[in-house]
Each structure stands twice: as C-alpha cells, then as structure tokens.
Image: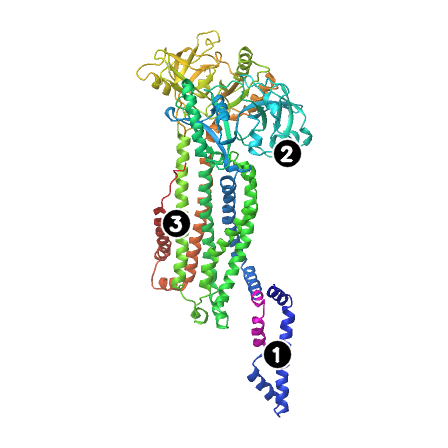
C-alpha cells in the first residue's frame, strides 16, 4: 500500500518533482562555480570545470527522474501519446485497420454469444442438469424417438422412484376470442407438476392449483368439460394482446367458445412442449389412459445424484412389465432419456459450431491483413526507427511503441466490433425464428469478456511480429545513398507467411462453402413426392363446442372448399389432417395388418394416419400409382375404404396388387375392422427431403371427419396472392374460426432444411469476406513490392525487358504464394458430414 501511494504521489506531482530536481541540480552547479571563483578562476573557466566535474544538468535530471517511482508509468503515457499522434497522421491506415479488426471481432463475438447462450449455458431453471426429456422407442419398428402414451406415463409416475417429478402435456392450436377479435394461438395442456418441477413462478398472479388440475378434464376432441376452466398466459401473448397490463389476471377470455379465466402470467415464454406456445392449460391424466397413442410430451426431473442411465433402466423395467401385461400395445417398446438441454439444442448445434469456426477464421484473416499493413508501414518508417536508435533509444522502446500502436487500433476495432455484435444479436431473433433460446440473447459481461479476449488476440497477431521487425531497422536504410530494392529476408519471409496463411484459410472457407452449397442444392432438387409450388396452406382448428366430428364439420369444410374454388386463379382445393412439412395437425401412427393374414407380429406394420378430402392428391399433385382416389361417393354411409402408400403396399403385399385387398387398422376411435383398399398412393417424404418415405394409410374425410384440417389451395402459376382472400372467406363463414396462419407450402418445405440453408448463406458470406480480404492482402503485398523494386524494374526495362515479361515477373510472385497456400488449405480435411 505504501509503495502504491508513493507511485500515486509521484504521478500526481511529477511536474513539480521534475522542477525541484532541476533546481536542486542547478544549485549544485552554482555552488561549484562559486567555489571555483573563490579559487581565482574566471567565470567561463569555472563553468567549464563544473561541466567536466558534474556533467550536464538535463541528462542527469532525466536519469534521476527515470529512477523515481512511477517513472515507468510516465514513460508508458509518453509512448501512448506518441502512438496516438502517429496514428492520427496516418488516417487511412488507421481507418482501414480499425474496420478490419471490428469486422473480425464483431463476427466472432456474435457467434460466440450464440454458441455460449444456446449450447453451453445451462437452461434457465434451477438445477437444469437434472431435467430430462422422455421418449418411447421401438428399434424393431424403426422408431428411434416418439411421444409417450398416457397409460404408460401414468404407470411411470406411479412406479418410478428415481424421479422427483414427471410432467406430461401436449400442444395444439385453439382459437382465442375477446373484444379485440379472434386469433388462433398455440396452447399447451400440462399436468400441474410442470411449473413446480421447472421452478417457474408466475410474474403476475399464480400458476395452477391441484384442484384446478383435477377438474381439468377434456373430451376426445380435446374440448374442456370441467367447471371453471383457467389458463396461464405466456409473456409474449400477454405483452402483445393485453399490452403487458397486470390487471389482465382475473379477466375472462373465450377459448374455443368456452370462457377461461386468466390466473397468471409467466415471466418468460416457455418453449415446452414445443416452440411458440402462448398459453398453458391445466390437465389431468385420469381420462383415457390408453397405451397405444404415443403423442404426449414427457419431461422429468431426476433425483439428486441419479444418472440418466439409472433412471432409464428403472423405466425399462416398468416398460418390460407393461409389455408382458399388454403385448398388443407395448411389446417391443422401450424408453429413451435425453437431457432436456441436449434435446432443445440438438438441431442448432452443428450449425452454430460450424459458423463459430468460420467467424474465427475471418478474425484471423482480418488480423493478418492488419499485420501486413503494419509491415508496410514499418518498412516505410525504417529510417525513422534507425534514427531513433542512433539518438539513443533502446530497441525495447521501439518495440513498445509499435505494440502501443497495435493495441490502440485493436482497442478501437474491438469497441466497434462489440457495437456491431450488439446490433447483430438484436437482429438474430428476427432473422432466425426457429433458433432455440433466442429470447435469451444479449451482450452481457461474458460476451464483452470474449470481445476483450478477441481484441487482445487481434492486437497480438496484428502487431507483435511487425513491431519486432520495426525494432530491428537496418542502419544502411537510414544513412545510405538510397533505399534498398528489397526488404530483408526475415521481413519478406514473415510477410509471405502471412499472405500464405490468409489464402489457405480462405481456401478452407471456400471449400466448406462449396460443399454446403452443393448439399443445399441437392436438398432443394430432391423429389419429396409432392409439388409445393403455388400452394397456400391454411390450418383450421374447429372446436367441439360449435362443431362435432360429424355432419357440422363436414358442412363447414364443404362451404370452405366451395368458396375457395370460386376464387380467381384457383386450380384445386383439398385438405388433410396432417400436411407434408406442416408442423400443425394430428400426426400419429397406428398398427395395420392384412385381414386375410391375421394379426401376427410379422404381419403388423405401423402406418401413419392421413385423413384427406377427395381433391387433396390433386392439390399437392401426389401421383396415384394404382386404383382410384376418393370421390363424393365415399360418404359416411358408404362402404369403409382407404388408400395406402407404395411403401406399405410393398410391405404387406409384396408380390401382388394391394387394390381390392382388405386392411385392418387398429384405430381405437373408430373401431378395429377391415377396410377395402381402393388405391395406392405414391410415397411422400412427409418431413422434407431429408426424411424417409413413410408407410401411410389414407382415409376419406367424409367417413372419418376430423375437426382439424389443413386446407391446401393450388393456384395457377403467376396468379395474384390469395392469402387475404382466403382469410376473408374463413372470416365470412365463421368469424371465430380464423386460420392458424396462412403459409406457402414451398416455405414450409424449405423450413425443413432451414438450418442448413442458413448455415450455407452465412458460411458463404464469411467465405466471400475472407476472399475479399485475402485479395486485398495479396494486392497490397504486390503493390508494396513493386514500389520497393521500382529501380530494379527500371533497370530491367532499360536492358530490354518487355512489359509482358515485367508483368509475368510480378505475377509470378503472387502465383507462387497462391500455389503454396492452396496446397496447404486443400490438404486439410474438410467435411459437411454434420449436415
């Protein structure tokens, strides 16, 4: 502390101390002169003897000042001022260097923040490492992960001892109505232990009580039947629809024509069971404990010290017991546990890590360019450096001055890069709508700390080697008759190494970008089994309060289809409960088997259930391979019929036609009996070009009416947009039944590989920037060499060299560097296998 205070006093009083030292030394000189005068010497002789005996006052004063506490800090401040003055005189050099560093630091900080927040930071719940997502799995059926049956989940909840809690729920669209109008929102029904298990408390009001969950029972159409239904608003819906008014708690809103009382508001939006949930409803598992409808989302919290493997083994034992007791629904089904964090971030992980690596390479290339600029600047200032050395400056002082210049540029570039990162992070949620945890992005202390580290790295890469070379000037450069025609061999080798590294890193980025472009192009060109161009999709969710699953819903959809067909430019209108690539609508599978073969394990197949209208195949241009499609004659009183996909037809009747055969579908809501197969439909990659074709069964909507239907409207190419007209038609038929958004099917198809396309776009952008920076680096290096060798080139021309030979001579330098860099960059292994 005493030493620190001494330093502080010296720094504060440094000018007064210098003056006092100078006056004290002058006083010693005057005393010596007076003494010599008394001995009889003249004034001039006395002062000459004083200089010989005591030395000059100014150098001694400087030496004494350098020995005082705080002198080193003063020297640093002096060097800082010198560096600032030097950079202020070289404005173009300063501007370009700051911009290059800002580009690299901004890109790397943005990607680091995304990776740290999304992939590495724990979920925003107490002890998030104990949260897991539970799935049912059946390898023999080719099912890696699927939802959980209610009956199985109820057995887990009652028998599992290694879990503190097991919550269950599922999401579906419901129509919210109040004095502002109607809109379809995504709601989630969850058991009451979800919020306590996650440690989530309401921002306003409260979450559900046990009594509210016990009376929260629903019909088979998911319509609430209990008294006094309640809901909890998500933060986004509360802000958008209710203006963030705390008095919204206690209000009543209409949800599917039923009055729901708002009891609370969440502090943040929850992305459970899937992103986009805007309201939560209580739910109980006591109703319909089936064991064969696997669509429920299950989330659990492990007890302290319990591993996921131990919990999975415990549930596997329960699954084994259920398989022996209920072989028709549970044989061959097991359990899979995934950490909740891993499940949430699985799709975004390879994209973010790849982009983080690309941004790091851009940072290195930008810093290499700045280093080349420093080399050129140092070579131009070699006379100044040699003169400083000749006047007594130490080499370490020149090195320090160079590092100060690099540090100032890096600090300015880092500050600007951090500002760029803040702007980019504000735009990420808008540009990357399906990025998990996008609501948690901000420029916090961790991100700023990384920006500081990236800035220090930039200063080190850009300034260390050039500063060291600048501190080793050649005296001949300063005091010779003229400039040397070439730089020293070490300086030239260092510059060449930087250029080669730039080009090599650029080649790596270009190769990776090319592979990603090829992969995305292959995905776009892949045949998904349907034509997504010129098709509008409007998911409609009818409610059981105003419609039933029979005549009323059929009449409603008949009116919708008739009105839509009359719109100009419409070619075909169809509908299906679940549409390819659409995330909305019931999508589930059921066991099927040929009626003549009987229900044996080798005959039973899992097939996805698709309920469609007669014009659905025409609307999506799905080919009919054999037999016929559905018509108006396949009504509720007609013979039960269905169509099957090619994959299912080959699996069940490999050597004969499927048309005319009888197929039994274990469809619990409609009974288990044979259906006549009237057609075979071409395979469809239902979840996009990366998915495999599924076995599917198609039912006519008139015979198996559903409240939920995805309406598909095909228009003529070049027809005017019909989204507004489609919404108007739905509003005129029933104002309380708007569409759950209107989307183009081509956009939904593109969304299935949106992560890959986004990675390609950003990676190609990084590669383009790197290519530009490398080109600038090579150009700057060649331009500097040409200026350096202007005398040599003049001699060559004087001796008869043609313009072509001179150009070839200069271009040969660049070609040599490109060959070395490309061979280095292409020798590394680069793969797009992550996609």
Quarter residue 731 falls in: top right
Taken as a whole, is the magenta stretch helix, strand or loop?
helix
Is 549 in front, or is 298? Answer: 298
Residue at label 2?
203
Q: Position of residue 641 (x, y in %)?
A: 42, 11
Residue at label 1?
25
| Figure check: 107 above or below 169 | below
Q: Secondary structure at mark 1?
A: helix
Q: Secondary structure at mark 3?
A: helix
User: Depth-wise, is mark 3 or mark 2 nearer the camera?
Assistant: 2
Graded by Cα atoms within 10 Å as few (under 14), some (14 to 19) or many (20 or more), the crowding at tag 2 reads some
- Outermost residue, left side: 655
Magenta extent: 58-74
Is 477 in front, or is 708? Answer: 708
| Figure check: 46 above or below 58 | below
* Mark pair 1, 3: CA separation: 61 Å
Q: In the figure, is residue 243 to the left or right of 819?
A: right
Task: Say if mark 1 contacts mark 3, CB within 8 Å.
Answer: no
* Mark pair 3, 2: CA separation: 53 Å
Inspect the magenta stretch and tell me whether residue 497 lies in it. Answer: no
């Amino acid at each position: 502390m005493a030493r620190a205070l001494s330093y502080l006093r010296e720094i504060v009083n440094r000018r007064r101390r210098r003056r006092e030292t100078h006056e004290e030394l002058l006083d010693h000189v005057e005393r010596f002169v007076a003494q010599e005068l008394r001995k009889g010497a003249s004034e001039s002789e006395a002062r000459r003897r004083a200089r010989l005996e005591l030395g000059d006052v100014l150098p001694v004063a400087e030496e004494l000042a350098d020995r005082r506490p705080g002198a080193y800090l003063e020297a640093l401040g002096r060097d800082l001022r010198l560096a600032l003055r030097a950079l202020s005189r070289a404005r173009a050099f300063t501007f370009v260097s700051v911009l290059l560093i800002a580009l690299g630091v901004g890109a790397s900080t943005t990607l680091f923040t995304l990776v740290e927040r999304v992939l590495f930071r724990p979920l925003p719940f107490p002890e998030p490492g104990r949260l897991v997502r539970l799935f049912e799995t059946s390898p023999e059926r080719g099912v890696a992960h699927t939802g959980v049956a209610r009956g199985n989940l109820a057995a887990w909840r009652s028998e599992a001892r290694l879990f503190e809690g097991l919550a269950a729920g599922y999401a579906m669209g419901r129509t919210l109505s109040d004095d502002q109008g109607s809109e379809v929102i995504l709601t989630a029904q969850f058991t009451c232990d979800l919020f306590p298990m996650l440690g989530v408390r309401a921002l306003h009001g409260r979450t559900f009580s046990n009594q509210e969950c016990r009376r929260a029972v629903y019909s088979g159409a998911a319509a609430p039947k209990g008294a006094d239904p309640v809901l909890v608003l998500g933060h986004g819906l509360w802000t958008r629809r209710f203006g963030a008014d705390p008095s919204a708690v206690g209000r009543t809103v209409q949800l599917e024509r039923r009055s729901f009382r708002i009891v609370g508001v969440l502090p943040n939006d929850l992305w459970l069971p899937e992103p986009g949930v805007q309201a939560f409803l209580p739910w109980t598992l006591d109703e319909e404990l089936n064991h064969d409808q696997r669509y429920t989302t299950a989330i659990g919290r492990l007890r302290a010290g319990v591993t996921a493997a131990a919990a999975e083994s415990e549930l596997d034992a329960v699954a084994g017991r259920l398989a022996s007791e209920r072989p028709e629904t549970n044989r061959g089904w097991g359990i899979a546990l995934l950490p909740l964090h891993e499940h949430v971030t699985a799709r975004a992980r390879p994209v973010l890590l790849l982009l983080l690596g690309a941004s790091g390479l851009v940072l290195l290339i930008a810093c290499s360019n700045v280093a080349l600029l420093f080399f050129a600047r140092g070579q131009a200032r070699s006379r100044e450096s040699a003169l400083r050395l000749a006047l007594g400056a130490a080499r370490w002082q020149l090195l320090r001055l160079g590092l100060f210049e690099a540090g100032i540029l890096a600090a300015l570039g880092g500050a600007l890069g951090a500002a760029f990162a803040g702007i980019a992070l504000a735009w990420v949620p808008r540009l990357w709508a399906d990025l998990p945890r996008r609501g948690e992005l901000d420029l916090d202390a961790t991100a700023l700390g990384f920006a500081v580290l990236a800035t220090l790295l930039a200063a080190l890469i850009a300034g260390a080697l050039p500063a060291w070379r600048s501190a080793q000037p050649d005296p001949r450069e300063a005091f010779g008759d003229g400039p040397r025609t070439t730089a020293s061999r070490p300086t030239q080798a260092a510059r060449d190494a930087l250029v080669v590294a730039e080009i090599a890193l650029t080649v790596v980025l270009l190769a990776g970008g090319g592979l990603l472009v090829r992969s995305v192009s292959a995905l776009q060109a892949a045949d998904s089994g349907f034509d997504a161009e010129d098709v509008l999709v409007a998911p409609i969710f009818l409610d059981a309060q105003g419609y039933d699953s029979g005549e009323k819903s059929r009449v409603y959809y008949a009116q919708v289809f008739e009105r839509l067909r009359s719109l100009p430019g419409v070619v075909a209108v169809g509908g299906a409960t679940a549409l390819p690539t659409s995330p909305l609508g019931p999508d589930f599978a059921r066991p099927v088997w040929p009626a003549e073969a009987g229900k044996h394990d080798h005959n039973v197949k899992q097939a996805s259930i698709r309920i469609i209208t007669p014009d659905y195949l025409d609307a999506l241009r799905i080919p009919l391979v054999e037999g016929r499609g559905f018509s108006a004659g396949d009504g509720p009183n007609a013979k039960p019929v269905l169509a099957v996909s090619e994959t299912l037809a080959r699996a069940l009747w490999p050597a004969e036609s499927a048309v005319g055969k009888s197929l039994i579908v274990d469809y619990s809501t409609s009974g288990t009996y044979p259906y006549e197969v009237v057609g075979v439909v071409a395979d469809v990659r239902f979840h996009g070009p990366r998915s495999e074709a599924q076995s599917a069964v198609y039912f006519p909507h008139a015979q198996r009416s559903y409240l939920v239907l995805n309406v598909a409207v095909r228009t003529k190419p070049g027809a005017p947009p019909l989204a507004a007209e489609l919404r108007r038609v739905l509003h005129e038929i029933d104002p309380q039944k708007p569409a759950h958004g209107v989307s183009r099917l081509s956009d939904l198809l593109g969304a299935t590989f949106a992560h890959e396309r986004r990675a390609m776009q950003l990676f190609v952008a990084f590669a383009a920037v790197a290519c530009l920076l490398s080109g600038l680096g090579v150009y700057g290096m060649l331009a500097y060499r040409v200026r350096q060798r202007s005398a040599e080139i003049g001699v060559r021309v004087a001796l008869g060299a043609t313009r072509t030979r001179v150009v070839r001579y200069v271009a040969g330098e660049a070609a040599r560097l490109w060959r070395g860099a490309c061979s280095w960059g292409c020798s590394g292994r680069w793969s797009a296998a992550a996609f």
